[in-house]
Amino acid sequence: GQQLNQSPQSMFIQEGEDVSMNCTSSSIFNTWLWYKQDPGEGPVLLIALYKAGELTSNGRLTAQFGITRKDSFLNISASIPSDVGIYFCAPSSGDKIIFGKGTRLHILP
Amino acid sequence: NAGVTQTPKFRVLKTGQSMTLLCAQDMNHEYMYWYRQDPGMGLRLIHYSVGEGTTAKGEVPDGYNVSRLKKQNFLLGLESAAPSQTSVYFCASSYSTRGGPDTQYFGPGTRLTVL
């Protein structure tokens, strides 16, 4: 099956710090999506990437689709309390979208 | 638009009981999916559908059946519930671009406990 590794599993940071997380795979994908999930809610799309090498920003969020099409990263700059949650990468090829195990972001007061 | 809705929000079953989870979307999406989410496991795909009348197995299909009789609805059935099926179930739908699924829109989830 397809192997998808998301890291780190969790992060504890101070408000205002920058955050970086990534996903790597042994498989090639056509699309990389990044989602955020708040407690008790379904995931919500943050950024969608469609081309190898593509770098896309959405406010304080920046994500890149790796040149090899096997990886992607998500950066959050100047973190704020509402950034707390679980972040998932979700690459796809064909008809299926698979999800990483998530990065749980904690912000220390 | 209501987006993606799921019924019920919570359910408790006894081992061996059956039930059906209903997912409905009003966005005319072709693709629909059922995932389960367990602590530390992320979301795992159970079954999916690429259009009305079609279904396909995902990563963890055993113990579940699905039907897509109408484009807007995707039903997930548990014929004989087991404690291992205790989980939060999410439905999602997406439109099709570039020959495959695009952004998924998720429902609020159904929390199922099997005793």
Image (cartoon, helix red, strand yellow):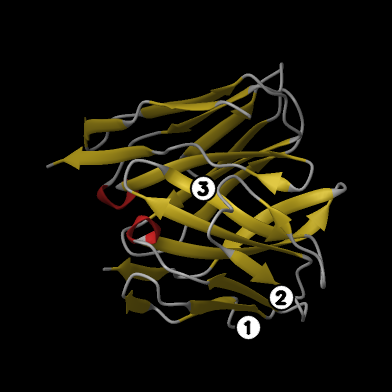
Q: Residue at x 56, y 66 (%)?
A: B91
Q: Nearer the viewer, mark 3 or mark 1?
A: 3
Q: Are dots 2 and 3 in contact, CB under 8 Å? A: no
Image quadrant assignment for residue B83: bottom left
The residue wearing badge 3 is B44
Quarter of the figure that contains the C terminus of chain A: top left
Q: Nearer the viewer, mark 2 or mark 3?
A: 3
The residue wearing badge 1 is B1
Callout 3: SS:
strand
In the rendered structure, which amino acid carries the disc numbered 3?
A: Arg
Name the side, left or right, on which B64 lies relative to A16. right
In the rendered structure, which amino acid carries the disc numbered 1?
A: Asn
Circle number at residue B33: none
**Mark 1 → mark 2, Cα distance in angstroms:** 7 Å
Callout 1: SS:
loop
Residue B26 at what x, y percent from top left?
68, 81
Chain letter belonging to callout 1: B
Q: Nearer the viewer, residue B81 or B70?
A: B81
> Label 1 neighbourhood size at 10 Å, few (<14), some (14-19), many (20+)?
few
| Vertical relation: B78 (above or below) A101 | below
Circle number at residue B27: 2
Earlier-in-chain disc, 2 versus 3:
2
Callout 2: SS:
loop
Chain letter belonging to callout 2: B
